[in-house]
Image: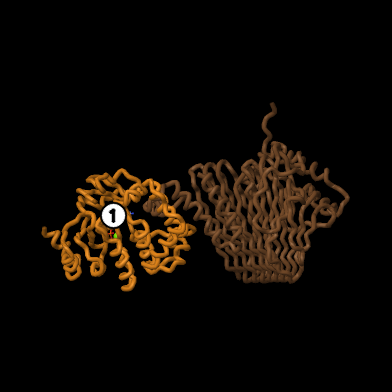
Amino acid sequence: MTAPATANELATELKAQALARANARSGNDALGPMRQQARALLEDTPFPGPKHERWKYTSLRALEAGHLKAPAPTQQPVEVPPDLGFARLVFVNGHFHEALSTLPDTAGLQVLRLNGEHEARLSDAPASPFAWLNGAALEDGLLLRVAARTQLESPIHVLHIGESGEPACCDMRIRLEAGEQSEITLIEEYAGNGPIFTNAVTEIESAPASRVMHYRLQHEAPACLHIGSLILQLAKDSHIRSEQFMSGSTLRRNEVQAQLNEPGAELELNGAFIGRGSNHADNQVCVEHRAPHCTSRQVYKGMAGDKARLVFNGRIYIHPGAKDSSADLSNNNLLLSNSAEIDTKPELEIYNDDVICSHGTTVGQMDALQLFYLRSRGISEPEAQRMLGIGFINELLLALPHESIADWARPWLASEVTEAE
Amino acid sequence: MLDIQDLHATVEGQEILKGLSLQVNAGEVHAIMGPNGSGKSTLTNVLAGRDNYEVTDGTISFEGRDLSGMEPEERARAGLFLAMQYPVEIPGVSNLEFLKASLESMAEARGEEAPDSVTLLRRARAACEQVDLDQSFLKRGVNEGFSGGEKKRNEILQLMMLEPKLALLDETDSGLDIDALRTVAAGVNSMRDENRAIVLVTHYQRLLDYIVPDQVHVLSGGRIIKSGDQELAKELESKGYSWINGEEQSA
Ligand SMILES: Nc1ncnc2c1ncn2[C@@H]1O[C@H](COP(=O)(O)OP(=O)(O)O)[C@@H](O)[C@H]1O
Ligand SMILES: [Mg+2]
């Protein structure tokens, strides 16, 4: 028997696997240039090891099982979540599944596949080696272009299902380009079962005065692994609101890179992440104010039961020229058990004086007085705890603009909270 | 219905109730008055079973059952209700859900059928009307952002929905303007019933103009030091609590 790999050896091994995967994919199609560029970046980027501050709480050891060496095949999914009442584009193990999909009304919207027919480029936001790997190995994905001054009434729903009985990996990529003064709602949903590693990248570019509503619903089974990057780039007077709901799993990491690039951009990020069993969820959010008169608001809530481990790192970076910036961040967390752990850290880097910035992070237990109040009305202690757990997250659901998403989220939340205890 | 004998209780290790005795029969309304800090809220919290309120001596019997070993939810299911002096805010849990969960737990414990959602909503709306709360309050988080008076009215709304055998109302009158006081009093009066007992804890006499008690007790220094009828409340009002304290010291 060989000794277990050290963390450094693991990082080296995973990088070798990632490069091998990239090399196997360098076709001569329209995605070729993007893959090559991403491959070069991948080669230059060390894989996270024990010394990486940003990976302090998240180990890649689960990938030791060899997921990166086994691309998941296209297959008929065993379990397809119910639709949300909107046109839905379905991907299975990173490949578009035509039979399960309904195409949206295309007036003012271009729906293109990133399968080699159309060019794509990498956004210039900083990214993790996994995001580069996604670009370097990409076989299929989605490009959505909303024409200028088009207001799409109905949301576009993109569902990714990852399923595998053996350790395997797949890539998923969505790029949304919202034209000037356009409006769109994009719902990303990730479902799945088994030891499949989904390596996802979503890029959203909002052109001047456009409005993008984005949802990210992640409820893959605990055995699934998911590393995702969400890259948001905002032009003048554009508005992006993103609502993120995620269950923890064996390995889950979400990186959000938001760049407010031009004056008047507004960003709203809200999220709830729930861990139970021995699940893990790591959120790394970075909001950069790169131009004056921009606003960002973030409300993230974490809730951990059993032996779950949650991480939140919220970085706000205000550039020297970004005068009259307004940024705030709140991350409140609820611990449901003594064996659960939540690590949260705000990081502020502010390089000019004309800024209104606030941030607050808390980790707490259930409020004894609230519990007593419920129990004094005849409600049992476990039920009272369940109600308070749901209530904690429900504050975010109550503010959702789409009732159908709240309707999806309530049973999700109820089952997460019930199993979290 | 309620029989308290020589009750001693501590809050976080400090003795607050020092030999309190009180008997309340079904159908009666009792008022407990007393200066701030005399232990009125402590008494109601001890009865409701709040954490950290510990009985160190004496007995509490409710319909012949010893309350002291029971969890707060068991006491509630047995028919005890506490309208808190400072009702708690629970954002994210709507008032209606709260009422539903409460009624369902009570019904389940008694082996009864809980009201269906149509009946629940109809009753909740009627109760809203009676305590003069807009129906939108049913959808809002429990007490979330309610004014002081709205919180008190919400407690009375719960009282009406839950129909307990014994209602303890802790300073439900404080912070109410005269119209709200009348509404709350009317709500409480509508709950008077030969099978139900009501204990009003109050600092002021004026509530007793609207809800006429059968007995008035003065709580001071952790004990009931004087009992009487409504005249006692009037006397307290005109002479102030120092009258009682003085009398106690000279006794
Ligand atoms: N949670 C608590 N911790 C410590 N002391 C308390 C607590 N609650 C009440 N007390 C003390 O107990 C005494 C009685 O308080 P309380 O029962 O609230 O009086 P009342 O309701 O008559 O104004 C006071 O001295 C108060 O400071
Ligand atoms: Mg009091």
In the image, the chain rendered in brown is A
Q: Which residue is mark 1?
A: B166
Q: Is residue A95 left or right of residue A224?
A: right
Residue A108, horizontal then vertical, whole percent: 76, 67
Instruction: Kindly identify the residue that appears in the image at 27 percent across and 61 percent down.
Output: B192
Amino acid type at image mark 1: Leu
Report the image quarter containing ligand 1: bottom left
**Residue B206 quadrant:** bottom left
Q: Is residue B60 left or right of residue A190?
A: left
Image quadrant where one finds the N terminus of chain A: top right
Determine crowd level at label 1: few under 14, some 14-19, many 20+ residues with C-alpha closer than 10 A.
many
> Residue placed farthest to the top in the image?
A1
Q: Is residue B107 left or right of residue A172?
A: left
Q: Secondary structure at mark 1?
A: strand
What's the colour of chain B in the image? Answer: orange
Residue B57, horizontal then vertical, whole percent: 23, 45
Taking B129 as reference, is A198 above or below it? Answer: above
Q: Nearer the viewer, residue A361 or B45?
A: B45
Residue A59, horizontal then vertical, whole percent: 64, 42
Instruction: Kindly identify the residue that appears in the image at 39 percent across and 65 percent down.
Output: B126
> Residue placed farthest to the right in the image?
A28
Chain ID of residue with mark 1: B
* Any part of residue B143 in sight: yes
Instruction: Kindly identify the residue that appears in the image at 25 percent across and 48 percent down.
Output: B63
